[in-house]
Image (spheres, grey):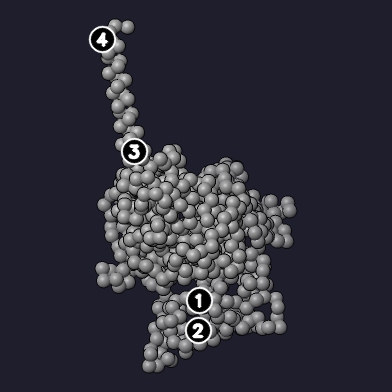
Amino acid sequence: MSTKLKKYFSILALIGLSYGAYWFFYNSHWGVAIDTERFWDYSFQPKETTSFSAVNWEESEKEIIPSKENKSQNLIFQTKFTLEDYTKIIEGLIEYNFRYSAKILINGVEFADVNRTLISPSLDNHKIKINEYWRPRKVKLDHAFLIQHLKNGENTITLIIYNVEDVKSINSSKKQLSFLTKGQSNSLKSNFEIEKPKNYFSESKLPILKINTNNNFIPDEPKIKASLNIINNSSEVNNFLDTSIFYNIKIERRGNTSQTFAKKSYSFNVYDPDYKKTPTPLLNLPSSVKWVLYGPYADKSLIRNALTYSIYTQMGNYAPRTQFIDLIINDNYQGIYVLTEKIQISANHLNIQPLKTNKNDSSQLDGGYILEIDRSEWKSIYPPKEDTSAIPVSYAVYAPKKKKISPTIQRIIKDQYNDFEKHIYENDSIYNYVDINSFIDYLILTEFTKNIDGYCLSTFLYNKNIKNQVPKFYIGPIWDYNFSLGLTDYHKGYNPEGYVYNSNKYIPFWWKILLNDKKFKSKLEARYFELRKTTLSINNINKTIDSLAKLCKSSSELNFSKWTVLNSADFWPNYYIGKNYDDEIKYLKSWIKKRTKFLDNDILAKNRKGVLYFEIAIRNDNEWMKKIKKKAKEKNVSIDEMIDIDAKYMAKKE
């Protein structure tokens, strides 16, 4: 090697060594001060305790199981870490279990109070990072706070877990504190655990709703102020940074069972600039004050509610209209949601005259009201106590709100409901009090979907006019069918055979009486027969499923990267566990086909397979229909005539 070449390599080596030394001593990098293997000291303390200097700390390498007494206390975690030069700290990151609502203290000073339901920003330049929901919560500790409250030598970090009642067991480790620091002066362990997300969100073929709560968590109630921006371009793709339409809203979490799910659902109202409620059209849906953002979670097809509402509408009834959207809250992607009209009385929704009252004269009443059957405070008086065949219905007035009507009007409504039940129970002029068509359609839909919550939960009735001497009740609108269509592993919801109306004592007694009434049974069979030729035909159902699934398909991958519920073993309350989104749609179609076969046999062929049964069988069999079309052409008759000929022939063979 020549002298010049040696000199050249020596210079390169010196430059590399200098660069490496600069990087080592001056470059910023992440390092771990407390790793996930560290066991923290802990103590249960009364909620009002604010000083922990005199606490008797405990240690445990096992999971901590809170006692009944502990459930009403705070769980305090504390440990120490050492810094050699705190001035080199740029920022920090504390990671802990996502289930905790926690206050974070550094050297006794509170940095943050992070409710477990708080949705924190996840921006990365012009994209949103999508992390699995179950990953540890990450809270950034900013430079201004750290430089003021850290010190050289020993420091203390404290976590106050204040939702112990929500947690079955707690691990005293599995928490990590990291710092972004300049150089190596603090001797922190190199941190290779900070992973880049596998997925990012920036655009969607669905409309995008962006909600900002100003760093407040969304409570169960009451509603809090927030802003809503909607992006719905005329082009095929929406970007979350595109121009949007702004609305003032108030929002809260909603639901009963769904409150236990990781993916929350919400209800919100729209307000004008002065924060007065104002009916507002959103996307392609008509004006409304009240809206729901339903988050499909256990329903991995994502479409059960929208599908059921669509079918009920095709049957000629009013059902809440829906729009699939991608939801962002506080710059954090939340997945596919269903924007849904809330049930309400208006010209755009349940189109009956609203209830009008006169404060000075309670006899001056006009208009209608809605009742809801659910876990409600009012109890019906039928059946009488001596009749144990069914449990009296729990119900309440839904619209108008109870607080807006006087005790006198509430009494009138209760009396009308009791009158309705009395005439059914005594089998006396039933159809003066029951709208037979709405009751038949509700029963057909509820049994077609095998909605295990049907009849006794989220079930609505309405009386069009309170002043009518004979109160006539209609059933509807429908609501909440997310646990239907073969989803659940309990109450035999998975079984395509059997009925809901006779499954438990909480089902209102009226259904068994109606189903033993000749007029009701006759109209039920005729209506079911007509629907199976049209709305409830397999071809129409599959077409509706395909159209809804197509809307969700493009965003489904990102939704399920946020909520990793696909192919998840032992996932409550699901009976079927599909490996992917397509599997879930295939299962839905397969279950419906089996369900309609059971209903056809039971409703149309209870005693024998007659003409009606075979007509439906022919119309819902694609191969049979091909033969029918061919024979109709050969015989020069219409397809309907050919179906009738074949159906009569098959029935005669029976």
Q: Is residue 518 left or right of residue 37?
A: right
Q: Mark 1: give few (<14), some (14-19) or many (20+) Cα within 10 Å.
A: many
Q: Amino acid at mark 3?
A: Gly
What mark, if any, has residue 371 been given in the picture?
A: 1
**Are circles 2 and 1 on residues that touch, CB within 8 Å?**
yes
Against 415, is 634 above or below? above
Q: Which residue is mark 2?
A: 413
Precedes in sequence: disc 4 or disc 3: 4
Q: Is residue 276 left or right of residue 509?
A: left
Against 533, is 355 above or below? below
Query: Residue 9 location, x and y as percent?
Result: 30, 15
Q: How far apart are the alpha carbons under marks 3 and 2? A: 75 Å
Depth check: 127 or 372 in front? 127
Depth check: 377 or 439 in front? 377
Precedes in sequence: disc 1 or disc 3: 3
The reply to whether residue 200 is visible in this rendering is yes
**Are circles 1 and 4 on residues that touch, CB within 8 Å?**
no
Q: Which residue is mark 3?
A: 183
Q: Residue at x 40, y 78 (%)?
A: 354
Depth check: 5 or 353 in front? 5
What mark, if any, has residue 243 been given in the picture?
A: none
Q: How far apart are the alpha carbons under marks 4 and 3? A: 35 Å
Q: Residue at x 61, y 45 (%)?
A: 624
Q: Amino acid at mark 1?
A: Leu
Q: Which marked residue is nearer to the observer: mark 1 or mark 4?
A: 4
What mark, if any, has residue 4 been given in the picture?
A: 4
Total of numbered circles in the picture?
Answer: 4
